[in-house]
Image: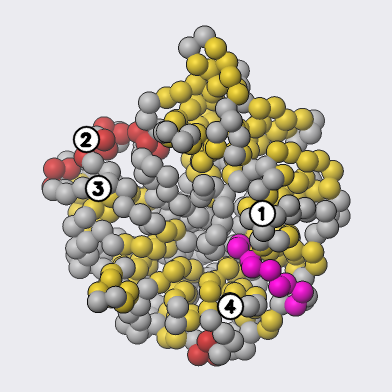
Amino acid sequence: MKKILIFLSAVSLTVTGASSVIACKKTKEKQHEKRTKEKVLMPVVEKLILTNLTLVQPPNSVKNKRSINFEKEFNFYNGFKKPIINFDKIKSKIISFFKDNYSNDYFITDNGLYFLKNKNNKLIKIKNINSSNIWYINFDSKNNMYFSMYSVSLGSSGGDIYMLKHNETTAQKINGINERIFNINIDNNNNVYFDSNNGLYILKSGETNAILNKDIKKYGFYKKTLGFDEENNLYFTTLNNTYVLKNNENEPNKIDNLNDEVTSLFINKNKVYFATVNGAYFLKQGETTVTKINGIEFLNKNNKVNYFLFDKKYIYIGCLYKTYILDYNYKIIKLLPNSHCYIYNNNGKIYFGTGRGIYKFNPNTMKYQKIKIKNINNLYDSDDEIMDIYYINDNIYFKEYTRQSINFYKINSNDLAEKIDNLDKILIQ
């Protein structure tokens, strides 16, 4: 699976991805070998799983959507097993932080990017990067980092693209592109794809000059790259249609019978699944006409498919108003409350985050229950939105969003949620 970058913050943050990280928005597996074929949103159980499931971006990109203003008084260094030697070297605000494929830590500050070298726990400034305007980041299978900067000048927007090679501390500028980037995707051969208003730029593995794909541009306004299937075929959307560009070909093929806006793509057992604003579809390997999954109801134009989840027996489709459980003949066998995020635990139970609390589901008994929140000596049902769910060291944590605040909880062995002070100190360890 592809390794996905993690951004952590004290407030709501959009994270998109799949691997040991599975996404949810209101939205470790070390990879030392060659990138394996991508399988998106398969149930995985790791010591650290971050869940965020409105995949409006392809499954291998992360967006630094807003400045978080992480102040030093959060005492990041206290979360590490040993202190950072020169933490005071950062004289400015920490905006956010993330990890690479080898769980090395990076800090985005308002004067640039810092790398924490695990060998001696020393912060190192990344050369050539002197602002916090890092927007999208992704890592290839060799742990090389690709990231886009964002800038606005005289009413126009743009930004440089950089590559930071594994174990190096000087970022190298990518030539051939200087405009606002909306996504960074990497295929199974470590080729890098940059989405922009001008079209799709492609950077071949090992090169430093990105090329605009003019063949794709003529098919209309390029919206975004959805992702890659197991054969390394590229799926993308324009303003009006969805296409597949097969591996080693130049001309894309239009996907027929898919007229709704596609928000995300999922791969399972040689089939491609499309989440749209008006239905759920699948495409068999080698075909160009999708099949709509019957019975997925949409009550209004604001409904949409949030995610697909696959296990050995069932397909789970999370939507705004319901969560559907289907067998692999696409027969609906169970309905659950709406959900936009989920997590597995080691016992095979699934926790679903919804707009009205968090639910636990047992696939073996097909029964579910709402998790109650412990408040002093009282128990009550949460009717607030669950923003994120985390599985860390065999424990389930979640963030609850109310109109007044964001609250952090841990689910204990009795399936009761107890409030905790600061989830970020747990996440950073």
In the displayed structure, would residue 140 be above or below residue 427? Answer: below
Identity, as a three-letter code, of the amino acid under mark 1? Asn
Q: Quadrant of residue 197?
A: bottom left
Other-residue count near label 2 (Cα within 10 Å), few / some / many at <14 / 14–19 / ≥20: few
Q: Earlier in the sequence, mark 1 or mark 4?
A: 4
The outermost residue toward the front is 300
Residue 94 numbered mark, or none: 3
Q: CA distance from mark 1 to mark 4?
A: 21 Å
Mark 2 = which residue?
A: 73
Q: Is residue 91 left or right of residue 355?
A: left
Residue at 39 percent across and 62 percent down: it is 137
Q: Earlier in the sequence, mark 3 or mark 4?
A: 3
Q: Quadrant of residue 251?
A: bottom right
Mark 1 = which residue?
A: 303
Q: CA distance from mark 3 to mark 1?
A: 36 Å
Dot in front, 3 or 4: 4
Q: Earlier in the sequence, mark 3 or mark 1?
A: 3
Mark 4 = which residue?
A: 238
Magenta extent: 256-264
Q: Is residue 296 left or right of residue 344?
A: right
Q: Nearer the viewer, residue 320 or 340?
A: 320
In the displayed structure, would residue 263 be above or below residue 396? Answer: below
Q: Nearer the viewer, residue 253 or 340?
A: 340
Q: Secondary structure at mark 2?
A: helix
